[in-house]
Image: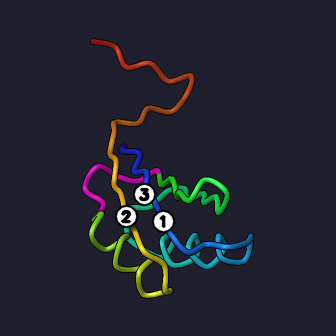
Amino acid sequence: MIKVILGVEGMMCGMCESHVNDVVRKLGGVKKVSSSHMKNRTEIIAEDDADIDAMKDAIASQGYRVFSVEKENYEKKGHHSKK
């Protein structure tokens, strides 16, 4: 699993957050989405092969601008992988 943190410009309120969350949630491989208009960011938990460009395009299609992308490995809390 991966965690993708997108900087998103243009969200003004909770409804904006909902619009962004809804379009991203419809994409393949996306497990969880949360957005904050106060922090100008959207955090996405997704499968390793999720399409980050598709996420950016989906958000842009709603009239918002993605200005940064961070990606990191994600492990569910409480689940430790044995090596």
**Please, what secondary structure does the residue beneath circle 1 have?**
strand
Which sits in the foreground, 49 or 4?
Answer: 4
**Please, what secondary structure does the residue beneath circle 3 have?**
strand
Q: Which residue carries the number 2 mark? A: 67
Say if mark 3 contacts mark 1, CB within 8 Å: yes
At 55% from the left and 27% from the top, the residue drawn is: 77
Image: 74 above or below 44: above
Residue extent of the magenta highlight: 45-50
Residue type indicated by callout 1: Val
Q: Which residue carries the number 3 mark? A: 6
Q: CA distance from mark 3 to mark 2?
A: 7 Å
Q: Which residue carries the number 1 mark? A: 8
Q: Earlier in the sequence, mark 2 or mark 1?
A: 1
Say if mark 2 contacts mark 1, CB within 8 Å: yes
Q: Position of residue 38 (x, y in %)?
A: 67, 57
Which sits in the foreground, 78 or 42?
Answer: 42
> How many residues crowd around disc 1 within 10 Å: few (fewer than 14), some, or many (20 or more)?
many
Q: Position of residue 29 (x, y in %)?
A: 38, 62
